[in-house]
Amino acid sequence: MTELGEPGQFSAYMVEEAARVELALERAVERLDSSLKADVAAAVRHGVMGGGKRLRPILCVSAYGACGGSRTEGAYDLGASLEMIHAYSLMHDDLPCMDDAELRRGRPTTHRTHGEAITIRAGAVLIPAAALQALYACRHLGCGPEQTRAVVQELMSAAGAGGMVGGQWLDLLGEGRSLGAAELDGLHRRKTGALLAASLTMGALAAGAEDRVAEALQSYGRAVGLAFQIADDILDATESAATLGKNPSDADLGKSTYVSLYGLDEAKRRAAEQVARALDELGRSGVDAPHLEALARYVVAREK
Amino acid sequence: MTELGEPGQFSAYMVEEAARVELALERAVERLDSSLKADVAAAVRHGVMGGGKRLRPILCVSAYGACGGSRTEGAYDLGASLEMIHAYSLMHDDLPCMDDAELRRGRPTTHRTHGEAITIRAGAVLIPAAALQALYACRHLGCGPEQTRAVVQELMSAAGAGGMVGGQWLDLLGEGRSLGAAELDGLHRRKTGALLAASLTMGALAAGAEDRVAEALQSYGRAVGLAFQIADDILDATESAATLGKNPSDADLGKSTYVSLYGLDEAKRRAAEQVARALDELGRSGVDAPHLEALARYVVAREK
């Protein structure tokens, strides 16, 4: 593991961590391959292996390590389950009847290359596959059955009605009309925040952390999630689609964003406020976690 | 519980059981309601509460009872988790880019009344919701954590790559070209059979049945599933869309069916063969289960 300290070292850490997540995802996709028809397996691979920062698995592995977990290899497998849910949500979000996006991370979206029907199936199959992946990872992490139950409950809650999908709905509804500040916070607390917070909680639970610690890390995750979303809105407003590799932008879709609601300066202030809150929560958790500290700063400092 | 014996009594039993499943589903949908936006909650309700035989929950409750389970109320909650997965699969199957069905059980399909985007979301949200529903039911059934883990693993396996979705893919591929006999068996073993078999296994696991018993009931479920599918193909070929309340028919879609492959008489013979196999497996399980015996006969004798 790369030591931290200077900004360049943290970038190296993120690249190294993402590469290890990539390996865990490759293993997960390979296990799926054999039980899916070739077309849907290819769409799953396109959606899951499409690059990205792998922030959720990295947060999960960091929380696991910070809480004293020692079976690092299995923690990446657990992290992969979060990224599978994340990939499903992007695949469905990009569909013609949703955001109708052509580009994601600089590549054509899954439905553009694999068709709509296959993308709906491939996205949906990633949900039970993620649950099974979490069960698999827990076995390898030596989690007891009660821990395992809690981990799966956390993942499925974040993936479902109480989490992402609730928020995505508000999202579609938000197109074409302005959301209020409280609505926008509520939207992102669920859309992005639920899965980011679950990343921390799952890592902590798998390491056998005390409830008190898991809860503080979850609060850290919620704050990081909100900071991440505000930073996303800022990038969306200030960078070109070519730089972001994403098309259309949220502004093009007429969605309310932190920038459209508060202006650029206030949005930046609010992002910094959430980072400070995340660091407070981290302090409250009592764990020694330099990576989580650096990650909180990274989400608003990143370039895309 | 209605006593069996004559055909009319079995029909009364099925109606009574379906009504109790309906109550459990109503409770499940109500719990979901509060965390979903109104539009998607309405689509979930449309998809889940759309009537139907409720065969999977009834099989689950029967297996639970046959294996000595005594907390019947919670067994209906467990059964509801299976029906939620079944509802998701129908909602997505009926989409314009899949079967483009207008009618299901005599009513407009969910995407016809709630739109495509909402139906994709509502279908997908039912998958994690079903996992959480199974966790909830297991708690109420007093299952230990190891039992709970096994139940959830069973449900997610059937819902995912190894089960329904694998088969659905073969299904779409089958349109427009003829499948061979082995391919058709393989398709239906996964498409219908996986969830039907899981219904039995989950009921048995939740009741704490021995592996030997759970496995025999699972084999019973696979045979019943195949018999059910052949009977479906026979109904599809011999009844009008108006009677079935389903449009388009599989024949309209150019899909291979047991009737198109074997002809009506041979299809009927094969259905009867699977019923006989199911009854053999039931005998092998050693449980006293008159309802499961009657259910095996019912799937090929039903009118739609």
Image (tube, coloured by chain):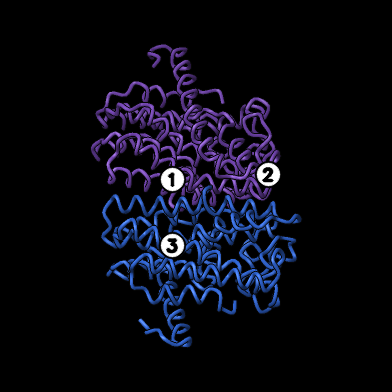
Chain colours: A purple, B blue
Spot occupied by residue B11 in the image (x, y as percentages of width and height): 48, 83
Q: Which amino acid type is marked by label 2?
A: Asp
Q: Which residue is mark 1?
A: A131
Which quadrant of the figure contains the C terminus of chain A? top right
Chain bearing tag 1 is: A
Nearer to the camera, B23 or A166 = B23
Can the viewer see residue A170?
Answer: yes
Q: Which residue is mark 3?
A: B199
Nearer to the camera, A31 or B6 = B6
Which is closer to the viewer, label 2 or label 3?
Answer: 3
Q: Which amino acid type is marked by label 3?
A: Ser
Which is closer to the viewer, label 1 or label 2?
Answer: 1
Q: Image point 48% across, 86% down: which residue?
A: B7
Which callout, 1 or 2, points at the residue further toward the start of the chain? 2
Q: Residue A100: which disc? A: 2
Chain bearing tag 2 is: A
Taking A219 as reference, is B134 above or below it? below
Which is closer to the viewer, label 3 or label 1?
Answer: 3
* Numbered label tally: 3
Q: Is residue A63 left or right of residue B117?
A: left
